[in-house]
Amino acid sequence: MLTVKDPHETWRTELLTPVALQCGSPGLSTSFEDVPSQWRDAPIRTLRCTDADGSWAVLVTVVRGFRQQAGDSLVGNEFGRDPHTAYDLDSPGDLVFELQVTEDDGSDEPELLAFRLFGDPQAVGAEVLRWAGKKAAYSVSPSVERAGTRQRRARRQFDHRQASAASPPVRVGVVSDEAAADLGALDASALCWHFPRGNTGAYLRSAVVALAGYGEQRPHLRSRWLTARVEGEELVIGIDDLIPANQRHRWDNARWLWDRRAANTPAGLRWQVDRVEQAAPAVAAVRRGALPEALTNAGVETDPELDALLTGVPSRLSDAELTPTWVANLYRGLADLAPWRLDAAYRGWRDARQAQGLPVQDSVVLFGLGGVGAARKPKLALDHTGDAPLLRLIHTGSNAVLPYVHWTVPTDLDAHLHGWQPSLPYPH
């Protein structure tokens, strides 16, 4: 059972008071408290420094330590300490300041971010202030592409689409008999018009478009797919073994992009709006960088970590250094977002999984934020609250994604928003 007080409470308080005074900056609260210890029966008098929301804390106390020889410490500590005896200030050794940084990561116990020992109060106070200022130090102003640059690229892409649709350079490679019906319904002009494009307007050479799957279709198992890919200046139709869940360009549920049998699909089903002007305000907001506004107006919810990144602020202390990379990739990845389509996109993904008896408790990834070499990477994912779509930041090692055509601005709709008339037979 814990004793009522730390026997060295007064002594520790006196030694920690200069640190508390040094850390008395706006937005940072300091308090003394007794913290239980696994190494002794008595609690330990500790200085707690934290921000307004209490999501992280720096805990500072005084222990007995000893100077380490050069190379003895793997974490750069000048001092070491024996956890069994160090908290007894009557034991031998130097009086040193022990600093621990913890952050609430949603688990039962806070995550330990740092543990260090310091020989003087000014040094430990400076370290507290460094951690307290970390979010501000790595905050950035989100940036978006200039409207003129985007307009010129969109025009190049549109002109290339029109030219390729007028004289579609499509060649059929090795295709199995099971794809005969789909091959017979292939609209080469529509396929060339919609095929992903690079900045110059030419076909995106790395893209592999999955058109239709055959055999037993399980999202995370390889199966046979009718595909279109770039070879030279042509699109080549063939059969590939693909993992369907991992395909960014998967058009089996958007057949109007390539299949004559679906050419009369109405705009409401293709775009999730009936008229061009209904999409204009959301697209304009996204493209001027007002993502929070666009998401709110579309009824899309976001989690606290994503809220922080959308404003350019680190979502967590532990990842603060990655904030500039994550914010840049977040805004770049959402540059073509159609927020009003997210509800239908999630429901379509959910219904397809439920039809195969698969679980839907996980989110579906839109894209990754980069900057991490570990197996579990930070990614933007789409979920649902039951009432509204929810965008959230997750960490996962899965390569599964929601195909771009289901949550971005449809290419033909984008052309109409610019006032250009696509050479396609779709109703609009």
Image (cartoon, rainbow, N blue to C red):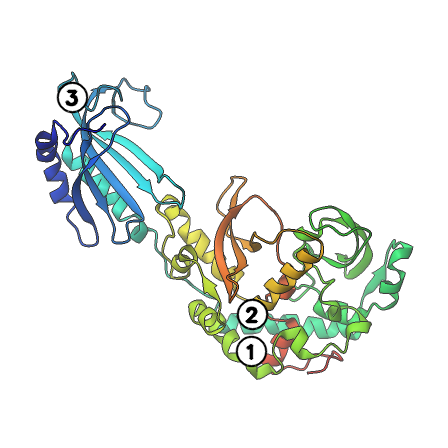
Provide residue 44's location: percent of width, then percent of height: 19, 31
Provide residue 168's location: percent of width, then percent of height: 80, 69
Q: Earlier in the sequence, mark 3 or mark 2?
A: 3
- Mark 3 and mark 1 residues within 8 Å of each other at the beta carbon: no
Provide residue 19's location: percent of width, then percent of height: 14, 39
- Mark 1 and mark 2 residues within 8 Å of each other at the beta carbon: yes
- Identify which residue, 88 or 291, lies in the foreground: 88
- Identify which residue, 62 or 76, lies in the foreground: 62
- Kindly identify the amino acid type of the residue bearing the numbered disc 3: Asp
Q: Quadrant of residue 139?
A: bottom left
Q: CA distance from mark 1 to mark 2?
A: 8 Å
Label 2 sits on residue: 338
- Kindly identify the amino acid type of the residue bearing the numbered disc 1: Ala
- Kindly identify the amino acid type of the residue bearing the numbered disc 2: Ala
Q: Quadrant of residue 350?
A: bottom right
Name the residue rendered at 43%, 67% in the picture: 292
Q: Quadrant of the N terminus?
A: top left
Label 3 sits on residue: 94
Q: Quadrant of the C terminus?
A: bottom right
The secondary structure type at the circle numbered 2 is loop
